[in-house]
Amino acid sequence: MTKIKVTGNATPPVFFRLAKLWATKVKNGRVDIPALYGNGYCAGCVFNENIRMLILNYKLNEETIIENPEFNTPGKTILFKFQNVHSNLFLKQSPSVLIATSRFNTDEVIAIQENTASVNIEVNSQYLEELFALSQKSPVLQSLSQNAQPLLFEQMISPGIQKILDEITSEAIDDNFKWVFRKIKAEELICMLLMKLEEREEKQLYPLKGKDVQSIYDIRERMLTNLNEPPVIQDLAIEANMSTTKLRTLFRQIFGDSIFGHYQKYRMKEAARLLKDERLSVSEVGYKLGFSNLSHFTRVFEEHIGMKPKKFSTGG
């Protein structure tokens, strides 16, 4: 296998195409978007042949597509995509991280979406194996190490991970130290994510087809936009054009949760938001989220959030 040798920090080639597209320049690995096209910035660095980082935080006036100059670049990489993570978000979706093998993180064209707030870290899978001996760990980490089939995992972002992401995107760091600091933090994030994936219990992983992945995400989106309606597996399977067994298996493989467990987790997250931000009463939140029994709502909320909803709403 041929490897591209990169010595020292380098700007990702795609940034020069972006700068040309937006009639601006790349400065210190960063492209600031002119007001004519939107606002925000793209920043990035190829640290070496093993690891690179992109920081994308912008809102464009319209979606743009450009050719990816690194399409078909040799080598197997793992993508860690931390999405909806910046403190000055243009988006309101929940922060999460996608972990994907090579088949899912490269495309011939790059869709520059209208709203993006993410930190992308790409790491050579052989480098990860050398660091962590992943082939001796759980089936999930073994599969990442082999990087031989299309796999995708999603994890919610913990407060500890969010703190590191805030440090990475901070503007307070001196330019002379910024990218060295970010490389160290990138490796810290990767270590934390691998530790979380190690906790997953899957014994066998199935290669994922793009169509199936899209169906799973469509099902999840519909489920999470109707948090007052508990999911009916049979109905979801019909909608996804899958057997109930396949739906359950692929859903758990991607998200690390059962369908109902995932639904309940986000349901209680929404309950916490309604109590804190919307200042609704416990009974209003319970009924709004489909609970007919408020005692049951209180028990479920305490299981997920760690305290009763009444106490939570008053600041503990």
Image (tube, rainbow, N blue to C red):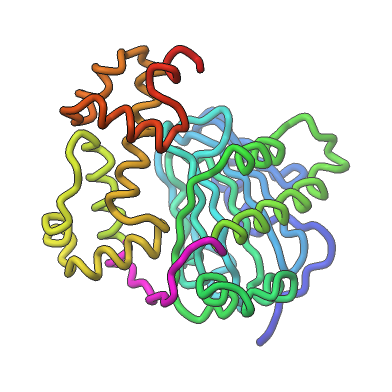
Of residues 152 and 196, which is closer to you in this image?
196
Return the x and y of residue 44 as percentages of the image width and height.
68, 50
Residue drawn at (49%, 63%) of the image: 200
Of residues 279 and 10, which is closer to you in this image?
279
Return the x and y of residue 267 as percentages of the image width and height.
32, 36
Q: Quadrant of residue 206?
A: bottom left
Of residues 82 and 244, which is closer to you in this image?
244
Q: Residue furthest right?
A: 176
Return the x and y of residue 38 as percentages of the image width and height.
50, 32
Please determine whether, in this image, residue 140 is positioned above or below residue 162.
below
Magenta stretch holds residue 209: yes
Q: Is residue 93 among what the camera can see?
A: yes
The range drawn in magenta is 198-213
Return the x and y of residue 163 as percentages of the image width and height.
66, 37
Residue drawn at (65%, 57%) of the image: 190
Magenta stretch holds residue 206: yes
Please determine whether, in this image, residue 80 is positioned above or below residue 22.
below
Residue drawn at (20%, 33%) of the image: 228
Overall secondary structure of the magenta section = loop
Q: Residue furthest bottom?
A: 1
